[in-house]
């Protein structure tokens, strides 16, 4: 056992003397820094902004959105800049901006491009918010459209027909014949739960650190195509694989220490003992995974072709920035194909 510790210490020392080791550490810390400054909309965020709705028809539409019962909380903004900043920061889910000439265009039934909609690429409720907005929008627009079109349809008795149709329009808007919702509660089946209590929980920092560490282990294997492997070839069959395994552990040690520190200082830690234990287990399992799967790559071309695929697929199957297993439950089982399951 003592010789194995010596092999590990010597290989760790050799790795720490290489530039690529510290470049990997710096790269990991940079990735964590970038992630810390990315704001993703909260799953519980139901705030929606409205801008330029102080008077006229815009104020009427805004009043409907603010007063009527809805799953969203609409908030008025004084200027478009503040609205844009809050959307970018994730304070609100999305926003609607009435154009400066909205009153004139709306009264003339010219609605194309009169409202600007803003969202981030990460929005999860934007389409539903749009439907909610346009439900109130068309309640008001229906009255304007009738006033504009009645003279074109009815040549005689225009005033009488206009009053009658506007009254019907008011009845439909205030009643529940058109704008009504029936709610039905459906009991969930026991097998329909997704990830139990962890459904919807993402690990952007831990996920990226883990995938980065996995990529480092892959690159450590890739160096075997460049090295002669004289030391390893001089060992017995069993020691040869132990030596290679310890090489992967040594390659990931510095990155593991940097990754653990980054997770803790980023404020995303699940507890330093939990994080450290899981990350160490991941390094042990990941090194063994590389040792086994590496036998499938007979040449550098095959290894290079699979490297990017193996790294990118883990962003999809693990809850890093989104949990796609909520939509494709099979992905929960696919996670066990990779060593990152030991960490996340």
Image (tube, grey):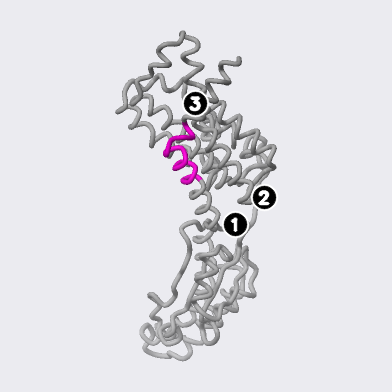
Instruction: Name which residue lies at 62% across and 68% down.
Output: 73
Q: Nearer the viewer, residue 57 or 236?
A: 236
Q: Which mark is residue 185?
A: 2
First along the sequence among labels 1 and 3: 3
| Mark 3 neighbour density, 10 Å: few (under 14) some (14–19) many (20 or more) | many
Instruction: Name which residue lies at 49% across and 49% down.
Output: 31
| Mark 2 neighbour density, 10 Å: few (under 14) some (14–19) many (20 or more) | few
| Mark 1 neighbour density, 10 Å: few (under 14) some (14–19) many (20 or more) | some
Magenta region, residue range: 15-28
Residue 86, image quadrant:
bottom right
Residue of label 3: 11
Q: Any magenta on residue 24? A: yes
Marks 1 and 3 close (CB-CB < 8 Å): no
Callout 1: SS: loop
Callout 2: SS: loop
Q: Nearer the viewer, residue 336 or 265?
A: 265
Instruction: Name which residue lies at 43% across and 30% down.
Output: 220
Q: Any magenta on residue 340? A: no
Residue of label 1: 42
Residue 344, image quadrant:
top right
Q: Nearer the viewer, mark 2 or mark 1?
A: 1
């Amino acid at each position: 056992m003592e010789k194995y510790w010596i092999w590990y210490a010597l290989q760790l020392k050799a790795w720490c003397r290489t530039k690529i080791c510290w470049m990997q550490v710096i790269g990991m810390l940079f990735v964590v820094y970038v992630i810390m400054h990315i704001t993703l909309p909260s799953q519980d965020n139901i705030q929606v902004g409205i801008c330029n709705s102080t008077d006229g028809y815009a104020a009427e539409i805004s009043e409907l959105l603010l007063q009527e019962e809805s799953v969203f909380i609409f908030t008025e903004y004084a200027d478009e800049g503040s609205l844009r900043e809050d959307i970018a920061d994730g304070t609100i889910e999305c926003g609607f901006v009435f154009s400066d000439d909205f009153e004139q265009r709306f009264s003339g039934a010219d609605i194309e491009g009169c409202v600007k909609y803003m969202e981030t690429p990460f929005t999860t409720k934007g389409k539903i918010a749009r439907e909610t907005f346009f439900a109130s929008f068309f309640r008001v627009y229906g009255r304007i459209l009738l006033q504009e079109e009645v003279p074109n349809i009815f040549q005689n008795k225009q005033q009488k027909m206009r009053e009658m149709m506007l009254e019907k329009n008011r009845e439909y808007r205030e009643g529940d014949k058109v704008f009504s919702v029936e709610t039905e509660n459906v009991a969930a089946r026991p097998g329909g739960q997704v990830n139990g209590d962890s459904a919807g929980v993402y690990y952007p920092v831990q996920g990226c650190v883990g995938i980065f560490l996995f990529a480092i282990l892959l690159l450590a294997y890739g160096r075997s195509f460049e090295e002669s492997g004289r030391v390893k070839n001089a060992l017995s069959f069993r020691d040869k694989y132990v030596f290679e395994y310890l090489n992967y552990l040594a390659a990931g040690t510095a990155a593991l220490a940097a990754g653990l520190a980054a997770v803790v200082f980023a404020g995303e830690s699940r507890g330093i003992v939990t994080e450290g234990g899981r990350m160490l287990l991941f390094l042990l399992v990941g090194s063994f995974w590389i040792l086994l799967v590496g036998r499938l790559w007979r040449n550098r071309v095959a290894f290079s072709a699979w490297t990017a695929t193996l790294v990118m697929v883990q962003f999809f199957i693990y809850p890093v920035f989104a949990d796609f297993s909520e939509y494709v439950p099979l992905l929960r089982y696919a996670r066990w194909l990779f060593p990152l399951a030991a960490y996340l």
